[in-house]
Amino acid sequence: MSGAPDVSNPGPQADAYVGLGDWAPETLGAGRVVPVVSAPDPVLSRPGGEVDPTADETVRLAADLIATMRVSPGCVGLAAPQVGVSAQLFAVDVTGHPKTVTGHGVFVLCNARVVEATRWKAGREGCMSVPDLTGDVKRASRLVVEGALPGSGETVRLVTDGFEARALQHEIDHCAGLLFLDRVAGAHAIYQRKVYL
């Protein structure tokens, strides 16, 4: 895939599984539902800066992302740039989605990076910030991601696959200033959305 980093051979530590430990979204407190911006808003194409995962503003933003995601039908992930904040922070929850095999529940990661990406497959994606279109994007179906948890600042490593792996890559792209439209093979792989859940 054009522009994708080569992380297929990251070394012997890639399979060291850490997981979320006892972190839970409730540790963030109550969040506010905030507006989601749509393309071509410039914040969506600007790489986000790293955040301090222990800072109060980071914890508040993490809570807002979860609150907004929960009231948005069909939403399985939401990144800070989608709510107008250029920062490396996103929430994911693929629980209950019919394509989910592996799922870690609701979580938020700060400053996430891909440690290992293998088993590339094409799949259809949509986005709240691109409400009228979907597209076929080639993504790794097995993924190892490292990031920090908001609040505690603890570094975690998640091993996942399938739909959750796709959601993570989609949100990491948002934090880098990329939309799924930047990853499609061409105009032939973009479609008008028929139904928005």
Image (cartoon, helix red, strand yellow):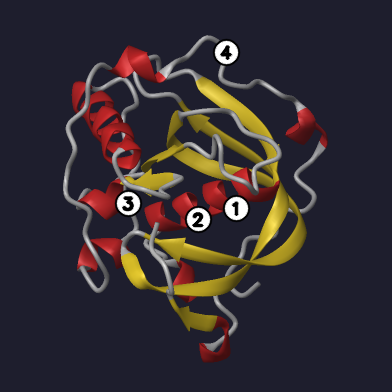
Q: Please state the horizontal and vertical placement of residue 150, each as a whole percent of the image.
A: 37, 24
Q: Is disc 2 in contact with disc 3, using a CB cutoff of under 8 Å? A: no
Residue 61's place in the image compared with 115, above or below, is: above
Q: Amino acid at mark 1?
A: Arg
Residue occupied by mark 1: 166
Give the mark, 3 or 1, whose residue is nearer the N terminus: 3
Residue ID at (55%, 77%): 184
Q: Amino acid at mark 2?
A: His
Q: Please state the horizontal and vertical placement of residue 139, each as a whole percent of the image.
A: 65, 61
On residue 21, the disc is 4
| Foreground disc of the pair 2, 3 | 2
Label 1 neighbour load within 10 Å: few <14, some 14-19, many 20+: many
| Foreground disc of the pair 4, 1 | 1
Q: Is disc 2 in contact with disc 1, using a CB cutoff of under 8 Å? A: yes
Q: Amino acid at mark 4?
A: Gly
Marks 2/1: CA–CA distance: 6 Å
Residue 22's place in the image compared with 176, above or below, is: above
Give the mark, 2 or 3, whose residue is nearer the N terminus: 3
Residue occupied by mark 3: 48
Marks 3/4: CA–CA distance: 27 Å
Residue occupied by mark 2: 170
Label 3 neighbour load within 10 Å: few <14, some 14-19, many 20+: many
SS type, badge 4: loop
Residue 86 visible somewhere in the drawing: no
Q: Amino acid at mark 3?
A: Gly
Residue ID at (20%, 21%): 56
Residue most extreme to the bottom: 188
